[in-house]
């Protein structure tokens, strides 16, 4: 038994910490996000495919349902604007032009990471804020499951991404 303990300790120390894996998941998500700038509304099937390796099955399903709801709403209300306009994945309507994943914390199943975001259009003073990204661990590793919007200004997205998507589905009558 004594000889197994040092080997087990080495194995545990060699394994990445959950916080590092959470950070990797968040960075992967924002790496995919960066290919969409400017991001506008609910991503279509092609867009969701880019996010798929980085998001939980639950979030992927919610995005798909919201996309179908938005399409049904648009078909039934030809003169109405979309239910979701602007960036869905950050607090800022125009999105973010840079991100930095900060500290992550949690346990072996779920966690959260602070993310510093900014938007710089090259004309106006850059905007900076912080959102929180929630991650879960599933059979395929760590994946983004939700985002809490954290920008302090009045017209920022508020609440959580999943609630925004659920409200969209409900408002579309789906």
Image (cartoon, rainbow, N blue to C red):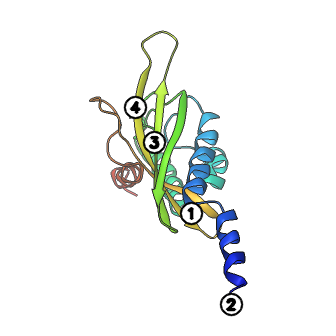
- The answer to whether the residues at label 4 and label 3 have Cβ atoms under 8 Å apart is no
How dense is the environment of label 4, judged by Cα within 10 Å: few (below 14), some, or many (20 and up)?
some
Task: Please identify the quarter of the rendering in which residue 77 is found.
Answer: top left
Check contact, mark 1 vs mark 4: CB within 8 A: no
Secondary structure at badge 4 equals strand
Residue 154 in sight: yes
Mark nearer the N terminus (2 vs 1): 2
Give whichever of discs 2 and 3 has the lower sequence position: 2
The span from disc 1 to disc 3 (Cα, nearest Å) is 26 Å
Q: Which residue is mark 1?
A: 57
Verify CB contact (< 8 Å) between mark 1 and mark 3. no
Q: CA distance from mark 2 to mark 3?
A: 66 Å
Tag in front: 2 or 1: 2
Q: In the rendered image, which quarter contains the N terminus?
A: bottom right
Q: Quadrant for residue 52, please give it.
A: bottom right
The residue closer to the viewer here, 87 or 167, is: 87
- Secondary element at image label 1: helix
Label 3, secondary structure: give it: helix
- Find residue 34 and report its image quarter: top right
Q: Earlier in the sequence, mark 1 or mark 4?
A: 1
* Residue 87 in view here: no
Mark 2 — residue?
A: 1
Among numbered discs 4 and 3, the one appearing first in the sequence: 3
- Judge by depth and name the residue closer to the eye, 109 or 18: 18
| Distance from the alpha carbon under mark 4 to that under mark 2 | 52 Å
Residue extending farthest to the bottom is 1
The answer to whether marks 2 and 1 mark residues whose Cβ atoms lie closer than 8 Å is no
Residue occupied by mark 3: 74
Residue 120 in the image: state x and y as whole percent.
50, 19
Question: Which residue, given by chain and number where applicable, does mark 4 sit on?
Answer: 129
């Amino acid at each position: 038994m004594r000889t197994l303990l040092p080997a087990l300790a080495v194995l545990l120390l060699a394994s990445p910490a959950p916080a590092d894996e959470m950070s990797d998941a968040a960075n992967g998500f924002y790496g995919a996000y960066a290919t969409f700038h400017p991001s506008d509304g609910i991503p279509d099937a092609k867009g969701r495919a880019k996010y798929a390796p980085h998001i939980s099955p639950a979030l992927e399903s919610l995005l798909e349902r919201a996309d179908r709801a938005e399409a049904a709403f648009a078909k039934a209300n030809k003169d109405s604007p979309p239910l979701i306009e602007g960036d869905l994945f950050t607090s800022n309507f125009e999105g973010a032009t840079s991100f930095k994943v900060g500290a992550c914390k949690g346990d072996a199943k779920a966690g959260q990471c602070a993310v510093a975001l900014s938007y710089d259009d090259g004309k106006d003073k850059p905007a900076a804020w912080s959102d929180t990204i929630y991650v879960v661990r599933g059979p395929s590793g760590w994946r983004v499951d939700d985002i809490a919007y954290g920008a302090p200004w009045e017209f920022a997205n508020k609440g959580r991404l999943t609630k925004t998507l659920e409200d969209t589905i409900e408002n579309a009558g789906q």
